[in-house]
Image: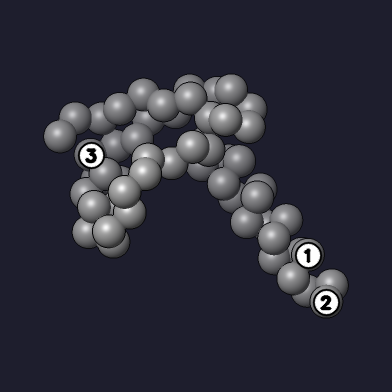
């Protein structure tokens, strides 16, 4: 396995999907590569948490 360059579907930034991250995804049984960069993933998670707290 080698590091992969991916493009974020939200902001369009390129980010590296490292060998370690790929191994983690495989270990967890995830079949798809991440579609968002780490910054957009954090922002999206924070937004979901804020929305959850409102209800």
* Residue 40 as seen in the image, left or right of residue 19: right
* Residue 16 as seen in the image, left or right of residue 19: right
Q: Residue furthest left?
A: 1
For the C terminus, the quadrant is bottom right
Pointer 3 or 1: first along the chain: 3
Q: Which picture quadrant has residue 40?
A: top right
Res 19 label: 3
Q: Give the labeled residue for mark 1.
A: 51
Instruction: Inspect this view and state whether residue 24 appears.
Output: no
Dot 3: element? helix
Q: CA distance from mark 2 to mark 1?
A: 7 Å
Dot 1: element? helix
| Residue located at (65% from left, 50% from top) | 44
Q: Position of residue 7 (x, y in %)?
A: 48, 25
Q: Position of residue 48 (x, y in %)?
A: 69, 60
| Residue located at (84% from left, 72% from top) | 54
């Amino acid at each position: 396995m080698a590091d992969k360059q991916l493009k974020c579907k939200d902001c369009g930034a390129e980010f590296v999907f490292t060998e370690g991250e790929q191994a983690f995804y495989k270990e967890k049984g995830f079949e798809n590569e991440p579609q968002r960069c780490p910054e957009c993933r954090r922002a999206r998670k924070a937004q979901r948490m804020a929305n959850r707290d409102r209800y």
